[in-house]
């Protein structure tokens, strides 16, 4: 479904992603893990076609994103691949009510009327545990956990094939984090999930395959349980030793 081949992205004069290969199959749950500055978030931007490539390519069902028109890329972002950002307060417009922003996703990517889009937004908010009255709220009026759940609902409204979650639990407390992880797990039963995180505990709870990044490259990958139980790369071993949330 998604294939990243020999990807190279320059950021500030250095290679933030350097010759990286990655594949995600339909229905697969993959976590990309690495320390800060390893290139994880730059990879997510490249998958969305939002940064220029210095080399390699990103393929969606075999089609190279570099050859797509701006209109095709707009349909791809949110329709085929939906992003759940690290900080939804920064990604939600402070000048537009939550319900309007959610409804726009269904209108744009599913071609439904505003009335139907609003109905779907209300249903999805309820599904992720946010009261329907939040449709009329401004983003700053919601708690951090509610905003993150609203971001999950927004991603699901476009009915994407792949959810790209970039550090979706970083700013949340333990209770909200557990709830968001449960919601991500539920969403991943219906579509593919690519989770970007620095937390091996989060990756272990959600992903079936683990990809470890360092200095813009993949240094280890494999089934999550196998990689965590017997890491082969020194970085992976260090991350495992530093994680208090792993069961082994």
Image (tube, rainbow, N blue to C red):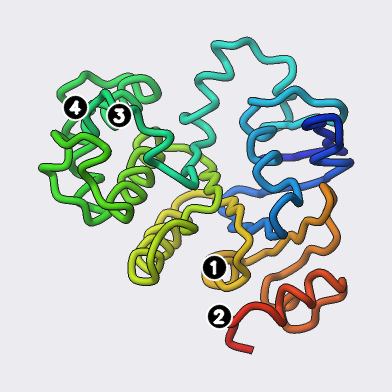
For label 3, the SS is: loop
Question: In which quadrant of the rendered image does the N terminus lie?
Answer: top right
- Label 2 vs label 4: CA separation? 42 Å
Query: Which label belongs to residue 245?
Result: 2
Q: Mark 1 points at which residue?
A: 202
Whichever of callouts 2 and 1 sits on the residue coming sooner in the sequence is: 1
Residue highlighted by disc 3:
94
Does residue 31 lie above or below 102 as drawn? below
Residue 171's disc number = none
Q: How far apart are marks 4 and 3 (CA)?
A: 24 Å
The nearer-to-camera label among 2 and 4 is 2
The Cα–Cα distance between marks 4 and 1, rounded to whole angstroms, is 35 Å
In this rendering, would 117 be left or right of 208?
left
Q: Which residue is drawn at 52% across and 48% down?
A: 165
Image position, residue 35 (x, y; %): 71, 59
For marks 2 and 4 on the same chain, the one whose residue lies earlier in the sequence = 4
Instruction: Rate crowding at label 3 as few (under 14), some (14 to 19) or many (20 or more) other CA atoms within 10 Å.
Output: few
Observer-side mark, 4 or 3, equals: 3
> How far is mark 2 from mark 1, CA to CA?
8 Å
- Distance between mark 3 and mark 2 Cα atoms: 35 Å
Q: Residue furthest bottom?
A: 248
Q: What element carries label 4?
A: helix
How far apart marks 1 and 3 lie (CA) works out to 29 Å
């Amino acid at each position: 479904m998604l294939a990243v081949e020999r990807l190279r992205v320059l950021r500030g004069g250095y290679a933030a992603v350097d010759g990286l290969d990655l594949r995600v199959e339909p229905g697969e749950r993959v976590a990309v893990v690495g320390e800060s500055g390893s290139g994880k978030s730059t990879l997510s931007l490249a998958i969305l076609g939002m940064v220029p490539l210095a080399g390699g390519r990103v393929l969606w069902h075999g089609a190279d994103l570099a050859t797509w028109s701006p209109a095709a890329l707009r349909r791809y972002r949110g329709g085929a691949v939906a992003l759940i950002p690290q900080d939804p307060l920064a990604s939600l417009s402070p000048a537009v009510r939550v319900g309007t922003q959610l409804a726009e996703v269904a209108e744009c990517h599913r071609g439904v009327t505003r009335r139907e889009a609003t109905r779907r937004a209300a249903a999805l908010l309820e599904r992720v545990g946010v009261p329907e009255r939040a449709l009329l709220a401004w983003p700053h009026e919601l708690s951090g956990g509610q905003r993150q759940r609203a971001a999950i609902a927004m991603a699901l409204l476009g009915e994407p094939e792949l959810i790209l979650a970039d550090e979706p639990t970083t700013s949340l407390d333990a209770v909200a984090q557990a709830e968001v992880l449960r919601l991500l797990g539920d969403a991943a039963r219906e579509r593919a999930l690519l989770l970007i995180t620095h937390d091996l505990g989060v990756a272990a709870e959600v992903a079936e395959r683990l990809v470890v990044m360092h200095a813009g490259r993949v240094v280890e990958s494999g089934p999550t349980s196998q990689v965590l139980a017997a890491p082969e790369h020194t970085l992976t071993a260090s991350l495992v030793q530093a994680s208090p949330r792993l069961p082994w």
